[in-house]
Image (cartoon, rainbow, N blue to C red):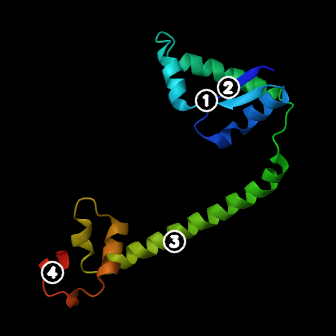
Amino acid sequence: MARCWWWSINPRRSALPVAVARAAGHQVAYLPGLAMRRIADLYPGRAKTDAKDAFIVTAILTAMDEQAVTVPGTAAADTVLPRLADSLKTVLQQRKQVDAEVEGILDAHPLAGVLTSMPGIGVRTAARILLEIGDVSSFASSAHLAA
């Protein structure tokens, strides 16, 4: 049995090539990224280039057109993924609305300008600080608040 090595940063993106290799009767094994880096160091004159990338992408597109192997779960993904995408879109729209509301509330607070003028403090951090502090009159002084 021939051995096929596959390396990928994201294992979820490996499903298709792994399925194709296994369907062709190849044994598939994981090759860690560090090992790939060490192997690449052995061939210094064969560095990654845009021309090589373009050639490989063309080869991948050609192979995809000829693909006959179906990754398990493809039909389920066609049903589930659009629903998940719609749910995510709704959540992102709600998040934008909440962000706008929080920014409006923060703008009305008397300490908003002072907080957001500090380096590294934006709307979210300023809102969080104000939520944690609560009523500033409960602090005897600004030094007490800072502590």
Q: Secondary structure at mark 3?
A: helix
Q: Is residue 46 above or below residue 113?
A: above
Q: Which residue is mark 3?
A: 97
CB under 8 Å between discs 1 and 2: yes
| Amino acid marked by disc 4 | His
Q: Earlier in the sequence, mark 4 or mark 1?
A: 1
At a point 19% along the width and 86% down the height, the residue shown is 139
Horizontal and vertical percent position of residue 120: 27, 59
Mark 3 to mark 4: distance in Å? Answer: 35 Å
Residue type marked 1? Leu
Quadrant of the frame with the C terminus: bottom left
Residue under pointer 1:
31
> Residue 73: image x %, image y %?
81, 48
Which quadrant is the N terminus positioned in? top right
> Tag on residue 144?
4
Q: CA distance from mark 3 to mark 2?
A: 47 Å
Instruction: Give residue 5's mark.
Output: 2
Instruction: Please tell me which of labels 3 and 4 falls first in the chain.
Output: 3
| Left or right, residue 72 beside residue 141 | right
Q: Are marks 2 and 4 in contact (CB under 8 Å)?
A: no
Please identify, in this view, whether the residue under mark 2 or under mark 4 is nearer the observer.
2
- Mark closest to the chain's N terminus, 3 or 2: 2
Question: Which residue type does callout 2 highlight?
Answer: Trp
